[in-house]
Amino acid sequence: MENACSIASNSCFSSSIFRLKTAAGLPSSPAELPFGKKPRRSFAIKAVLNAASINSSVINEADSEVVSVEPVYEPTPRNRPLRTPHSGYHFDGTARSFFEGWYFKVSIPECRQSFCFMYSVENPSFRKKLSILEQAQYGLRSTGVGAQILGADDKYICQYTEESHNFWGNRDELMLGNTFTLQKNMQPPKKEIPPQEFNQRVLEGFQATPIWHQGFIRDDGRTDYAETVKTARWSYSTRPVYGWGNVASKQKSTAGWLAAFPVFEPHWQICMAGGLSTGWIEWDDKRYEFTNAPSYSEKNWGGGFPRKWFWVQCNVFEGADGEVALTAGGGLRQLPGLSETFENAALIGVHYGGVFYEFAPWTGGVSWEIAPWGHWCISAKSETHAVELEATTKDPGTALRAPTTEAGLAPACRDTCYGHLRLRIWERRYDGTEGKVILDVTSKMAALEVGGGPWFTSWKGKTQAPEILNRVVGLPVDVEGIFGLAPFLKPPGL
């Protein structure tokens, strides 16, 4: 597998945009990917640093032909491999407070840049801002659809509308889209459509599936706290490598089988722990082209975000043979009931060599110490393995928006994609001491986040759920199989 990146300024290189070599065809199934050996990479970079100074560098494999990178569209297949539970849209049609959010990330190691796409829909029962009568009946509710991107150099773009009548989501699969502005005399899409048709019908908007992602958005001018770009356009295809579980097994619900029910909200599902993406992203006047770039996707849904949370994610590592994918996160979430009772919840998931290493409250517990900004230290153990990760950053980070119950889509967290990280996994001997080291790798491209609050001091915590609850959540219940016997009872999104 190759990984390629090209950056070209549309204004300065209009007559001689650098083209790069596309990769050979990817394997037709995840099982054919070379988990046991390091992917072969070749790449080319050409960048405009600023309007007055051009710095060009070219690194290319000997005797390689350079051609344009163009992603190939394929419709989302039914019963695709590596589909995780909760891939679909969870809105049940009721008027309860509800949001759903999606996150897609592409990392380009050769230029140490990442692009994080974030979409959200709030209270879709109300297709536009609530009337005075509706506010009297249901209380204050935020509505609408947001599209955010944290991109190259931690710059930012956001487009938002209070209306959601042009949003669509598939209840059975990771497929969604929204139209902010239509092309003249066109109707908004309500399902996945081929990219050419999308461009004919949608002037500003997006569509995303497990294997295809495209769109164009324009910054709406509401952000005065971060450096922004005016426009972003993208088109890329993705081949999933890891879902959430062993590659050869049925994929898992990230938060356990109880995530099928509206308890312990918000819920969290990693949809694709690791993939390989090919295509391009236009970021203002720069165009980034990439082949087999590491990629990732996840989602949240429920009544609202946790009171306080942290998150670490990385797909770009040094010192590993094959693809490695790390996701770790934790939060202070409210328990169901009338009283304001909160619990610590956290997990770490690592995919390596086709194997899923899961560390969660029901496998042995997770501990952490997270600074208000700049330092993340998380460890966990299961019966057979232990894991430890430490991440740091000197980057100031960028404030991102999240759906909040108090203020709608508002600044609520701080992120960077320039984290330094070390990850270690080892086998545990019978007496609990350290045995064979499975993985010891580092990265300079970790995505790091803290959110909610308050964050006056470092947060030291560990998962403390009652043992009986951990045992229940950790049971290998096949919820999809159960509802398969009575499909009419199956909750949306599962």
Image (tube, rainbow, N blue to C red):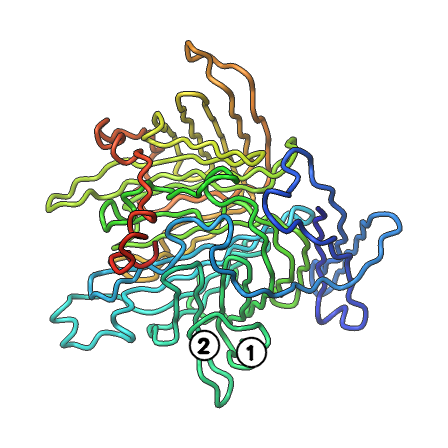
Which residue does the numbered mark 1 point to in the structure image?
197
Label 1 is placed on what type of residue? Answer: Glu
Vertical arrangement, residue 197 with respect to residue 252, above or below: below
Whole-angstrom CA distance, mark 2 to mark 1, is 9 Å
Label 2 is placed on what type of residue? Answer: Pro
Q: Residue at x 34, y 33 (%)?
A: 459
Which residue does the numbered mark 2 point to in the structure image?
189
Q: Residue at x 70, y 41 (%)?
A: 39
User: Does label 2 or label 1 sit earlier along the sequence?
Assistant: 2
SS of the residue under disc 2: loop
Quadrant housing the C terminus: bottom left
SS of the residue under disc 1: helix
- Tell me residue 172's x, y (percent): 38, 60
State the count of labels: 2
Q: Residue at x 56, y 44 (%)?
A: 418
- Tell me residue 279's x, y (percent): 65, 61
Seen as rendered, the residue at the extreme top is 431
- Tell me residue 398's x, y (percent): 47, 52
Classify 10 Å Cα crowding around label 1: few (below 14), some (14-19), many (20 and above).
few
Residue 167 falls left or right of residue 13? left
Q: Residue at x 65, y 64 (%)?
A: 72
- Tell me residue 147's x, y (percent): 44, 65
Q: Is mark 2 in CB contact (under 8 Å) with mark 1? A: yes
Which picture quadrant has residue 123?
Answer: bottom left
